[in-house]
Amino acid sequence: MAAKLFSALSMDVIDFKPPYKNKVGKTYVYVRERGLKSNPRVQLCHSDAPQTCPFGLNINESGSKSFVINVSDPQLKEWCAAVDQVVMEAAQANAKTWFGKELDAETLEAFYHPLLRPSKEGYDPLLRIKLHDYGDERKDTKVWLHQSEDGEDKLVRGKIEDLTRMCKVLPIVTLDNVWFVQNSFGMSLICTDVLVVESPEGHANAVDFALPFAPVAGEDGLQVMHPTTFGGTWSTAPDPVDFHAFQAIDIYADEANAYTLADGTPAPIARNANGDVVITVRDFCAM
């Protein structure tokens, strides 16, 4: 599913599932985009305004990996504050199920860890972003680097170790879950993709990483915008480019009929796992 620029995400679509307790007893409240089964997914920076990753890759004692960015963009600061407000309102409305008891706004505010954390005086606040690196290509964070070869700009896959001190990055994240540790709770951002735009090691001058708002219909705009790198696209629900097989109907054919096939049987629009027709085009249109 393609991402969108952070400023395009409406706070109204952020929804929360019931609390979930994992095998070791930790509680999480997973986030979803209202009306969808997936998490909200956004690009955190404009393509021409990457943010600095001052400390590079961080690995804590448990092996979890993350990085932080200095947030200098006023619009991104406002967005983080808006997300915090959504979480706080949800916590107060669901305090009994989240915490086991009713809590007032003042107490919740004391427990909550906001997305932005103060840095040293004179520096921009810090935003921590978690990385997935578990050997699962489908779920792990994908790091991208820009390279120029024979005058052609392209993106190549990098490694999480390319997140070095003072590099500049364009991260794409999901609003994944609300975590709870003792009397603290906060929102986790999980990085799905990150472009290392510039680093002391020499990666410089980013090509466009505007996956979320590239002028491309369908999904995975990054792949479409860089065909020499990816060689194709993999859309989950592609629309047809013509109507020779629109819901299995060739509307260009002589005496074409949207409701019946050539043999006169009703045209199906959905089948069950056994191949049985569960709804026809005519029934669907009449709904």
Image: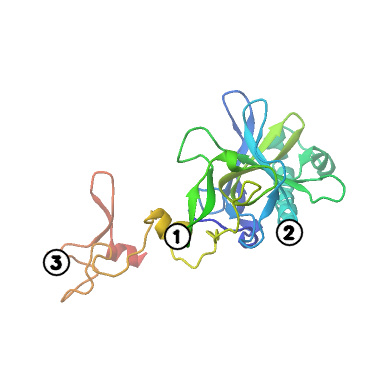
Colour treatment of the image: rainbow
From the viewer's perspective, is the residue at label 1 or at label 3 nearer? 1
Picture quadrant where residue 206 is located = bottom right
Identity of the residue drawn at 64% across and 63% down: 48
Residue count near mark 2 (Cα–Cα under 10 Å), binned few <14, some 14–19, many ≥20: some
Q: Is 131 left, or right, of 268 in this rendering?
A: right
What residue does disc 1 label? 150
Q: Is 250 left, or right, of 61 in this rendering?
A: left
Disc 2 from disc 3: Cα separation: 60 Å
What residue does disc 3 label? 262
Identity of the residue drawn at 84% across and 43% down: 106
**Where residue 44 appears, x then y in whole percent?**
64, 54
**Of all residues shown, which one is farthest toward the bottom?**
254
Identity of the residue drawn at 23% across and 72% down: 251
Picture quadrant where residue 67 is located = top right
For mark 2, give the secondary structure.
Answer: loop
Residue 12 or residue 39, whichever sits in front: 39
Position of residue 54 relative to residue 179, above or below, is below
Do labels 2 and 3 touch, CB within 8 Å?
no
Disc 1 from disc 3: Cα separation: 54 Å
Labels 1 and 2: the sequence-earlier one: 2
What residue does disc 2 label? 73
Give the amino acid at mark 2: Asp
**Of all residues shown, which one is farthest toward the top?**
24
**Of all residues shown, which one is farthest toward the front?**
150
Q: Which mark is residue 17?
A: none
